[in-house]
Image (cartoon, rainbow, N blue to C red):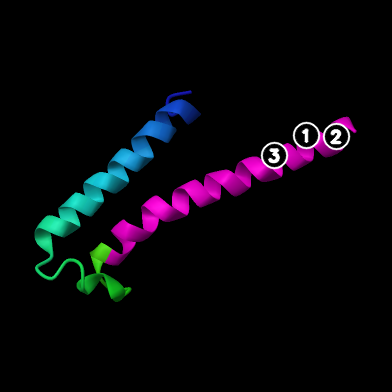
Amino acid sequence: MFLSLPILTVLVPLISLAGLFYSASVDEDFPHGCTSTSSLCFYSLLMPITIPVYVFFHLWTWMGIKLFRHN
């Protein structure tokens, strides 16, 4: 498998951080322009938060299935 979980665990935050730095360098009013959902800055700030939350709940569901199956 080419993209395993350890590789994705490192790669996804680095790509999100690169997107954040890109939007900070391109957008003129970076801190104040991040409130509109049509801006690239909004999504570059949203992705680093969304991905760990998704991984947490995915693992929580997996653990629930494992515990239900073994008890």
Identify the residue position indicated by label 2 in the image: 69
For the C terminus, the image quarter is top right
Secondary structure under the numbered disc 2 in the rendered image: helix
Instruction: Please give the name of the residue rendered at 45% of the width and 55% of the height, measured from the top-left corner.
Output: 50
Judged by its main secondary structure, the magenta piece is: helix
* Disc 3 residue type (three-letter): Trp
Q: Which stretch appears magenta?
A: 42-71
Q: Position of residue 21 (x, y in %)?
A: 18, 51
Any mark on residue 66, and which?
1
Instruction: Please give the name of the residue rendered at 49% of the width and 30% of the height, measured from the top-left corner.
Output: 5
* Label 1 with label 2: CB-CB less than 8 Å: yes
* Disc 1 residue type (three-letter): Lys
Secondary structure under the numbered disc 3 in the rendered image: helix
The answer to which quarter of the image holds residue 44 is bottom left
- Mark 1–mark 2 Cα distance, whole angstroms, equals 5 Å
Identify the residue position indicated by label 3 in the image: 62
Any mark on residue 28, and which?
none
**Closer to the N terminus: mark 3 or mark 2?**
3
Residue 32 placement, left or right of 6? left
Q: Position of residue 34 (x, y in %)?
A: 26, 70
